[in-house]
Amino acid sequence: MRYCGRPFTTAEIERIRALIAAEPAPSRYRLSRQVCEELSWRRPDGGLKDMSCRVALLRMQADSLITLPPPKCAKPVSFKAHPHIEQAVLEPLLPPVLDSAALSVEPVEKKHDSLLWNAYIERHHYLGHQLIPGAQRRYFVHAAGEVVALLSFGASAWKSKPRDEFIGWSRAQRERNLHLIVNNARFLILPWIRRHNLASRVLALVRRRLPDDWQRHYGYRPVLIETFVEKPRFTGACYKAANWRYLGDTQGRGKLDRFHRYAEPVKAIWVNPLQHDFRTHLCNG
């Protein structure tokens, strides 16, 4: 079975069950770190992939492979517990007059900013807010101090035939180097913002700083960005204007759906290289 990009053997799942059955029972936090340590599941910079492991363990439980110990801590406080944040993301009565020539890109670093980002996405993005496991970066885009756009980047799709044919890598190369691709999971221009070419300018600005941010936080530089644009809801015109390349369409499956269990909308696949020699890094490592 494969979870969060890692295959788990029967023996490894049995080992996870043994760790769960240990006395005293481990917390879910400690369990994820123990699993990572025993299975040598680490990021390229050597750190434990415990966030991805927690998601993998939850999916194993959903598939009836394991039974996790009950959570020992209450769920973290969400943005919904902060009325002032809920109020801050409402559409203004009078849209601000903005100078879109002076855009700034700010990464989400502080807890308050994280809650605010989540609230904007939950209220105004058609897919809403979902937790992103593993390596990720989120951004605000401001103009004259006002939020005009929000983006997030996270783990890439495990398999995508048009993308994989475009790269030309083997299965082994994909398994080894998939972390060098990041996925633009959310992109939101706030609905009351109307500026010609704003979306493509935002994409270009974030693209310039994303590799350095990723290097600083995770110890390696991604070489390719991908995104999936739902059809016919969107045309992908802003990606085309920002020099992204259209590769084809998905088959209407989720990025982790290996067994054709879940039907999803067809999406257009767009990619943008962050380095001219991206194929060398993805195929050779």
Image (cartoon, helix red, strand yellow):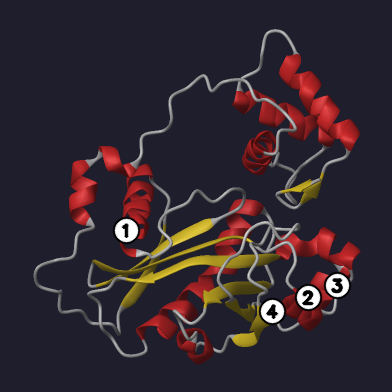
Q: Which element type, helix, strand or loop, lies under badge 1?
A: helix
Type of amino acid at the residue the image marks with label 1: Tyr
Question: Dividing the picture into quarters, in which one does residue 66 lie?
Answer: top right
Indicate left or right for 12 with 45 as reference: right
Task: Determine the CA span between mark 2 and mark 4.
Answer: 17 Å
Question: Dividing the picture into quarters, in which one does residue 52 lie?
Answer: top right
Type of amino acid at the residue the image marks with label 2: Asp
- The residue labelled by disc 3 is 283
The residue at 24%/40% (across/down) is 82
Where the C terminus falls, by quadrant? bottom right
Going from N to C along the chain, the mark reached first, 1 or 4, is 1
Where residue 253 sits: x, y (%)? 65, 65
Which residue is more in the foreground, 111 or 76?
76
- The residue labelled by disc 1 is 120
Q: Which element type, helix, strand or loop, lies under badge 4?
A: loop
State which mark lies toward you, 1 or 4: 1
- The residue labelled by disc 2 is 164
Task: Determine the CA span between mark 1 and mark 2.
Answer: 33 Å
Going from N to C along the chain, the mark reached first, 3 or 1, is 1
Where the N terminus falls, by quadrant? top right
The answer to whether 159 is drawn above or below residue 275 in the figure is above
- The residue labelled by disc 4 is 275
